[in-house]
Each structure stands twice: as structure tokens, then as C-alpha cells.
Amino acid sequence: MTSIKTPPILFLCVVVALGSLPALANITPIIDGRFDPSEGYTKGLSVTLEVERDKNGGNVPANEGILWLFSDPVSSDLFVNFTQPLTLIDNTYGNNAIGWGQHVAPSGKDHKFRSLKGSDKAQFTITDGAENVVFDFTMDYISDSDSAPSGFASLGVASKDGHVHSGSANSLLAWGTSLDYNFNTLGHVLTEDSPATDEDYTENPDLPG
């Protein structure tokens, strides 16, 4: 999740918005890496996504993701939550990975913690009403961090996976990712295997949240 300081703008993402979803209550969202349906986002957009195969195969359609938006009427800060479908990516890895592996995943790859730490990121492009780019950045999912309690955190745009392509890094006021939340808010610091679960992603009672 991100909170972005910008003038009034039209938000565009690197994926294509297909349709609106019901609005949530009009309160200011909490930026912590966890999405709560009651947080106050006022517009939801469905987005189409694809999974990359290896070099010899074409892409595979995934279920739709959801892009939630809220623009603060006083500050004009833009809040963005992008929730990807579990058919595209999830936080299961190691021996407890669900839907990964040579004969299961479209990519044919296993899922390790280092896969999430080493390359995962998301790019957001913000434009104004005239479609001029005012802020274009790639946000880091999780990296090594000396300042985080767990030793890992999302570093926003200040890492090898995070970059500002256009605009100022100071425009990114706050951010969070789900794995950062798991490690630093919940305290579940698991670098080998994610919590054991089933194909429905049932919460593991030994590692709640």
C-alpha cells in the first residue's frame, strides 16, 4: 500500500483497469501492508493480469487483481492499495508453497523466500488530468533492512528493486507490503518455509494473521 503526495490526479497503473467495484466507507486508510475492507478506500478497479511462462511458452491469464484508491479531500494525498490474486503470486514459499513447482506453476518455478526478497516489486505511474506523468516509481516488496525489527522490510523506492523513474522520491509518504506486515507487525519471521496451510490458504492457528 502507498500514500502519495500529489496534486489532484488521474491514477494509472501498469496494468489495465477494467471496471469499478463498490466503494468503501469514506475514512482515511491505514498504511501498514494489510488490506481491510473497512479501511476507507472509495473506488475499486478490477485489473487483468497474466503469469509469465518460461522462454518457450506464452503467458497464462490469472484471476483479476483489485486496485483500490482514496484521495484525501483536504491534503489531496492519494492512497493506493493493489491486491494481486493468489493465482498470480502469494506469500507461500519453501516446503509449504501452494501452487508452485515444475508441474504446477505456469512459470515452472519453485517459490522460495529469496524469490520474494530478490526481485518482487510493482511499478505505479501517476498522471494528471492531461495525462502528463507526475510520478512514476517502482516499489520494493521486501529486502534486507538493518533498521527493521525482523531484519527485512519493504524499502519503498530506496533499494535495488525500488526506483523513481519520474518525479520526486519525497512524494512517496508512506508504504507497506503484506510480507513486511507479516514479519514486522505480526512478528512471524520465516525465511525458509511459510506457515503450513492448504489449497484454500486456511490460516495456520500457530501463526495467526
Image: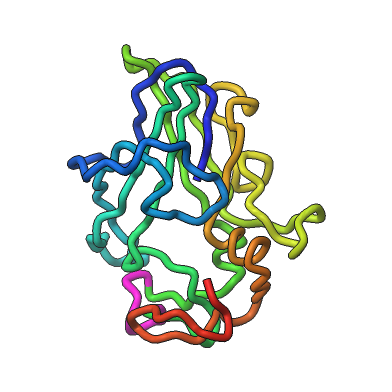
Residue at x 26% of width, y 62% of height = 62
Horizontal side of 205 relative to 36 (left or right) equals right
Asked if the stretch drawn in magenta spans residue 105, the answer is yes
Residue placed most toward the observer, 133 or 194: 194
Residue 105 lies, in percent from the top left, at 35, 75
At x 34%, y 83%, the residue is 199
Residue placed farthest to the left in the image? 19
How many numbered marks does the figure carry?
0
Residue 33 position within the rendered picture, expressed as x and y whole percent measured from the top left: 54, 53
Q: Is residue 119 magenta?
A: no
Residue 90 in which image quadrant: bottom left
Q: Nearer the viewer, residue 181 or 106?
A: 181
Q: Nearer the viewer, residue 5 or 70?
A: 70
Q: Which quadrant of the figure has residue 25?
A: top left
Vertical side of 78 occupied by 14: above or below: below
Q: Describe the colour scheme in one phrase.
A: rainbow
Please identify the dominant SS of the magenta region.
Answer: loop
Q: Residue furthest top?
A: 130
Q: Residue at x 38, y 75 (%)?
A: 108
Q: Residue at x 50, y 85 (%)?
A: 96
Q: Picture coordinates of residue 182 (x, y %)?
A: 59, 66
**108 sits left or right of 119 in the view:** left
| Quadrant of res 50 | bottom left
Between 168 and 35, the one lying in front of the other is 35
Q: Could you tell whether 149 is left or right of 7 in the image?
A: right
Residue extending furthest right? 146
What stretch of residues is rendered in magenta?
100-107
Q: Is 108 placed above or below 88 here?
A: below
